[in-house]
């Protein structure tokens, strides 16, 4: 009976240690979402650690170098304060100035955000353009009329 109790206690301790380790790793690897204002208020707190910034791409701030496969732009919330971003990788297809983005990476010592990932926010709604819908209706009617002849 005592031996069984000891085995149960050891098994419980092992399971508890594994759960604590998994939870600790989860918290350590979590990447939080921050705004430019939060980062600019205390940049030393965010330097050289992986974070995400959610903001808008400032208009007329994009520089795309296809030869180096490098995208440079600025993110902002209010068009008054900016964080420069450098991303070495393929420019996302839906990337546009004035559009919302989430960039993941690290703020370097010069205050430039070195992005490892650029996620473009887009509308969750899909609607067919009216002219396109009308063209499809006309095409359908033309096909129906052609088969009736």
Image: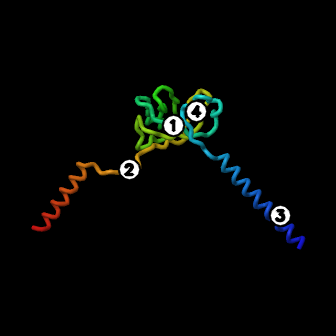
Q: Where is residue 68 in the image (x, y as percent from the top left)?
A: 48, 35
| Residue 79, horizontal then vertical, whole percent | 46, 28
Q: Which mark is residue 107?
A: none
Residue 97: name its quadrant: top left
Which of the two discs, 1 and 4, labels the residue nearer the N terminus? 4
Q: Is residue 121 left or right of residue 8?
A: left
Q: Nearer the viewer, mark 1 or mark 4?
A: 4
Q: Earlier in the sequence, mark 4 or mark 3?
A: 3
Q: Is mark 4 on a helix, strand or loop?
A: helix
Coordinates of residue 52 in the picture (x, y in percent): 56, 40
Q: Residue at x 74, y 57 (%)?
A: 18
**2 or 3: mark nearer the eye:** 2
Label 1, label 4: how many angstroms apart (C-alpha)? Answer: 21 Å
Residue 35: % across, % down = 54, 35
For label 2, the residue is 125
Name of the residue lying farthest toward the right: 2
Residue to which mark 1 is pinned: 87
Q: In this view, does 127 lie to the left or right of 20?
A: left
Residue position for label 4: 38
**Distance from the alpha carbon under mark 2 to that under mark 1:** 28 Å
Measure how far apart labels 2 and 4 are at the Cα level. 30 Å
| First-in-chain label (2 vs 3) | 3
Q: How crowded is mark 2: few (under 14 residues within 10 Å), some or many (20 or more)?
A: few
Mark 3 falls on what kind of element?
helix
Q: Residues within 10 Å of mark 1 (few under 14, many from 20)?
A: many
> Which labelled disc corresponds to residue 10?
3
Q: Answer whether labels 2 and 3 touch (C-beta < 8 Å).
A: no
Sort mark 3 into few (<14), some (14-19) or many (20+) by Cα contacts within 10 Å: few
């Amino acid at each position: 009976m005592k031996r069984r109790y000891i085995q149960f206690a050891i098994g419980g301790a092992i399971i508890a240690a594994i759960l604590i380790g998994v939870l600790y790793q989860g918290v350590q690897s979590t990447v939080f979402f921050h705004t430019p204002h939060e980062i600019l208020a205390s940049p030393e707190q965010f330097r050289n650690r992986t974070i995400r910034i959610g903001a808008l791409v400032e208009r007329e701030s994009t520089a795309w170098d296809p030869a180096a496969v490098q995208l440079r732009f600025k993110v902002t919330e209010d068009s008054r304060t900016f964080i420069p971003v450098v991303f070495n990788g393929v420019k996302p297809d839906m990337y546009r100035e004035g559009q919302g983005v989430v960039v993941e990476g690290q703020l370097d010592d010069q205050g430039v955000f070195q992005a490892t990932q650029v996620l473009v926010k887009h509308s969750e709604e899909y609607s067919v353009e009216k002219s396109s819908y009308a063209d499809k209706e006309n095409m359908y009617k033309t096909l129906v009329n052609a088969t009736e002849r």
